[in-house]
Image (cartoon, helix red, strand yellow):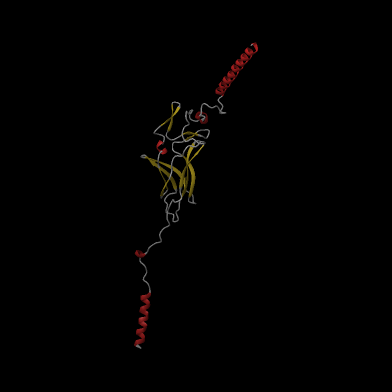
Amino acid sequence: MYSRVLAALIVVAAGVLAVPAPASAEDYVPDPPGRLTLAGSTVSPSCEADVPWIDYRVVLTDPDSQATSHEATLVLSGGGNTHSIPLGTIGSDGVLTGRVLWPGASIGADGRGDGWPGWAFVDGEWVETDGNFAWTRQEIQAEITVNPEIPVALSYPPATPLCLVAPPAEASPAGGDAASATDPGLASTGFDGAAWIGIGAGALGLIAVGGIALAIARRRRTSE
């Protein structure tokens, strides 16, 4: 009998020991949060109608809603200078796209560029200046900031045959005819009338002189 009781006690004790003790708060390890990142965000320079632009796409990945703000800003720095450009509010889809004027650029009433960084219109002519965000035309660093930040590559857009990123040579006042200012010797058709008229007159004169000389030579032969 005693042996049966002892065996039962041993079984009960083993069951008690097999039950795991409850975990304490110190032992709790939460799952790691999702990564908050701006990976995939980009900026790029562009030129349209003689206006330098910055095109941007901001992508915010925030699976655990850790971001404290959805306001995106582009920060430019270089040569000891810093300039912040508000880009806007990132939508619920986590994406923000658009474009902003390059610092120092401006647009005239005709929709074309009439101001560029590093240039000023003084006393009727364009002159280069160290002001008006001239430093942004040099090597710069750019960063998109929200709550996380991400560095992005950016440089001033180059000029093309169809788009100026600086005042044209011998430019007229801001907002003037950039095409005619670039090549002032050409009329709107590209024909320099005075020059061609002079060439034509000279050719006719040579023909006339040659005709007279030929006529005199023939008369001399006839009289002989």
Residue found 59% across the figure and 18% down from its top:
210
Q: Position of residue 208 (x, y in %)?
A: 60, 17
Q: Position of residue 127 (x, y in %)?
A: 42, 30
Quadrant the C terminus occupies? top right
Say if 25 sits above or below 77 in the image: below
Count of all numbered marks drawn on residues in the image: 0
Say if 177 sits above or below 42 in the image: above
Say if 81 sits above or below 94 in the image: above
The extreme bottom residue here reads: 1
Q: Position of residue 213 (x, y in %)?
A: 60, 15
Is residue 188 toward the left or the right of residue 89 in the image? right
Quadrant the N terminus occupies? bottom left
The picture quadrant where one finds residue 74 is: top left
Closest to the observer: 214 or 95?
Answer: 214
The extreme right residue here reads: 222
Say if 93 sits above or below 203 in the image: below
Q: Position of residue 10 (x, y in %)?
A: 35, 81
The picture quadrant where one finds residue 123 is: top left
The picture quadrant where one finds residue 85 is: top left
The extreme top residue here reads: 223
